[in-house]
Image (cartoon, rainbow, N blue to C red):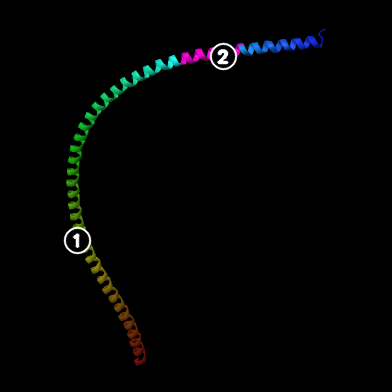
Amino acid sequence: MLDQSDLKILGEMFLASEERMMKRMDEKIDELDARLGARIDEIDERLSGRIDELDTRLGARIDEIDERLSGRIDELDTRLSGRIDSLEVQMKKSENLFMTELGRTCDYLERKIDAVQKDVNELKEYYRIQRLEDSNTATLLRLYTGLRAEVDELKVKIA
């Protein structure tokens, strides 16, 4: 079996081995970091060049499209302005025609309303007169009935 001193020696050996492994791992990591950094710088440089090239090409293409569209937009704006002006003139004519017809219709309806009002007033007057006549007739009928009763009484007294 291993005694205390052997275990101590083994522990020291493990520590030394562990330190060597950590040192080698640090070296490998540093080496890998350097290689990856160089590779990333190389890729970044290549991509930056390609991006600049694409930016230039796309900028020129966008400018060309913008110029073409601006011309077409100006052309469409001119055509639409003419159509809008024409529509405004037609709308004003239609509005004037509508307002004229509305005025004529209002005048016609006012004359009709006046005529109906006159007829209603005549009917009111007729019914007022009719009620008075009905009242007078009822009064005369009561007088007649009363006189008839008196005449009948007188006949009975005379007879």
Identify residue type, mark 1.
Arg
Q: Nearer the viewer, residue 113 or 19?
A: 19
Identify residue type, mark 2.
Ile
Magenta span main SS: helix
Residue 32 magenta: yes
Q: Quadrant of the N terminus?
A: top right
Q: Nearer the viewer, residue 51 or 126?
A: 51
Q: Residue furthest bottom?
A: 158
Q: Which residues are magenta?
A: 24-40
- For mark 2, what is the residue? 29
Q: Quadrant of the C terminus?
A: bottom left
**How far from the left and from the top, in percent, is residue 110?**
21, 60
Q: Nearer the viewer, residue 142 or 6?
A: 6
The residue that appears at 40% across and 17% down in the rendered structure is 47
Q: Residues within 10 Å of mark 1 (few under 14, many from 20)?
A: few
* 67 over 6 or under it: above or below: below
- For mark 1, what is the residue? 111
